[in-house]
Amino acid sequence: MAESAGRVKRPMPYKEWLTVRDIAVLLRVRESTVRHWIRKERLGAKFLGGRAGYRVKDENLEKFLNQEPVEGDSPGSTNQLTRTDKLGLKGAGA
């Protein structure tokens, strides 16, 4: 099976809602870092309760990755270097 021209290869199957673990794997950070971003309201998420934990809409992750770094971010922080097109999230719904 040949892939259609111009199709973006994603590192994982497309999901509209991502788990904390999904994001940690994509961005190569700890799950606790992702939860910290959620608690500080830098990354929009919905808490489903109990063991289900947080879910992040793909568009919220895209906004987070494209935002300006905040004071305290190191020069090599993930949200400065990683862009949604590199992760294959841009246009994923198309």
Image: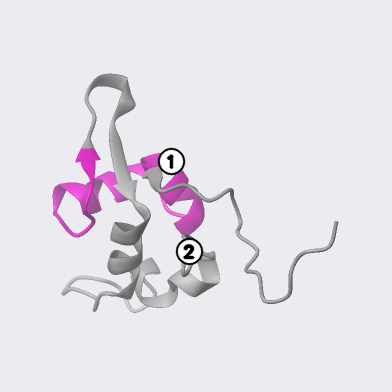
Q: Mark 1 or mark 2, which is nearer the start of the sequence? A: 1
Q: Residues within 10 Å of mark 2 (few under 14, many from 20)?
A: many
Q: Which is in the foreground here, disc 2 or disc 1?
A: 2
Task: Identify the element where label 1 is drawn.
Answer: helix
Across the whole image, how many numbered discs are drawn on residues?
A: 2
Label 2 – label 1 distance at C-alpha: 16 Å
> Is 88 situated above or below 6?
above
> Is 48 situated above or below 27?
above
Q: Residue furthest top?
A: 50
Give me the disc on residue 37: none
The N terminus appears in which quarter of the rendering?
bottom right
Q: Position of residue 56 (x, y in %)?
A: 31, 47
Q: Is residue 4 left or right of residue 52?
A: right
> Which residue sits at x=41%, y=48%?
16
Q: Is residue 75 left or right of residue 4?
A: left
Q: Given the image, on which type of amino acid does mark 1 rest?
A: Arg
Say how the picture is coloured: one colour
Which of the two residues, 7 or 9, is positioned nearer the viewer here? 7
Q: Quadrant of residue 5?
A: bottom right
Task: Identify the element where label 2 is drawn.
Answer: loop
Q: Position of residue 46 (x, y in %)?
A: 21, 41
Q: Which residue is mark 1?
A: 21
Q: Which residue is mark 2?
A: 89
Question: Which secondary structure class fits the magenta region best?
Answer: helix
Which of the two residues, 2 or 22, is positioned nearer the viewer here? 2
Magenta-colored span? 19-46
Q: Position of residue 17 (x, y in %)?
A: 38, 44
Q: Position of residue 7 (x, y in %)?
A: 66, 70
